[in-house]
Amino acid sequence: MFNAITQSQIYVLDQDEALDFYVGKLGLEVAADVDLGFMRWLTVSVPGHPERQILLEKPGAPAMSEETAQQVRELVTKGAMGGWLILTTDDCRGTYETLVARGVEFTEEPTERPYGIDCGLRDPFGNRIRFTQPRGA
Amino acid sequence: MSRTRTAAEDSNRRMLRARDAMDRAYAQPLDVPALARIAHVSEAHFTRTFRAVFGETPHRYLQRRRVERAMFLLRETDRSVTDICFEVGFGSPGTFSRTFRDIVGRSPRTYRKEAVSAAVPTCFAMAWTRPSV
């Protein structure tokens, strides 16, 4: 049957601002940035790992009505949209310090868990992101 | 950099920032002036807008966050009820016990005896086990 998850999606309110954040601050890299005419196909991945990409999709017409797009934007900014990511790192505390210095908005400081050390942040739009240093890493 | 948020979306995001502060710093004496500063709005506007966005007042949100964290510590640690009361931001054991019982329907000690632990990432435990209604 299946052997990988290659593409996932989260909604962003502005793709240029999303690039500034996901690439400029979090240090992900652009895997695809293609103007399809009807939409901008913009994906990012962990550097060197294009086999797992996140589509940064802007909600809007004609994929959905302008009214629905407005509802999606409201849910994203309330933190209720549900799109979220968990990344892994070799150094949770070091990465945290780096990102704090870059002005990233954290929801939770690095904390010891049974499974490792992890912490939480928000993207500029309201999406949840976490990163984990797995135990033993 | 283009900014495409409407005023309502920008307001939602500010309220979310204040709610995140309650989730992160629930043990600190967070009051409406402090939270309104985080959201960059006036105090009167803050409470009204927060309730419109999240369906409950900031006071109620914070109270239930503290109770949720207390439930977590009662389940997962063997620290004393008094320690836990102050650890999550309550000012006195009396207020803590009364609030806990009002919200959970049981005393902290009874809850501790009956609870079973939940091995999920903390962000999910905090989102899904904060008591409501």
Image (cartoon, rainbow, N blue to C red):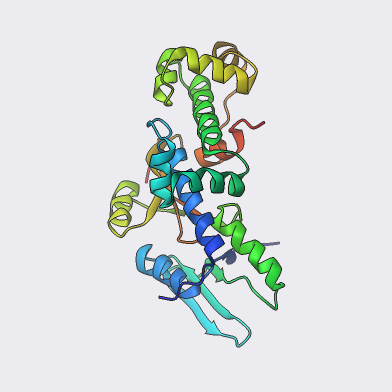
Identify which residue, A130 or A53, lies in the foreground. A130
Residue B128 lies, with reference to residue A32, above or below; the image says: above
- Name the quarter where the C terminus of chain B is drawn: top right
Q: Residue at x 40, y 16 (%)?
A: B83
State left or right for residue A51 relative to residue B116.
left
In this image, B11 relative to A60: left or right? left
The residue nearer to you, when weighing B38 against A105, is B38
Using the rendered image of the protein, determine whether residue A99 is visible from the camera's viewpoint: yes
Quarter containing the N terminus of chain B: bottom left
Residue A124 screen position, x and y as percent: 45, 61
Res A4 visible: no
Q: Where's residue A48, x and y in %? A: 41, 69
Q: Depth check: B125 or A90 in front? A: B125
Give me the residue at 64% from left, 32% from top: B132
Please provide percent x and percent y for residue A51.
52, 69
Q: Which of the 4 image quadrants contains residue B8? A: bottom right
Determine the residue positioned at 52% across, 32% down. B65
B102 relative to B53, above or below:
above
Q: Residue furthest front?
A: B44
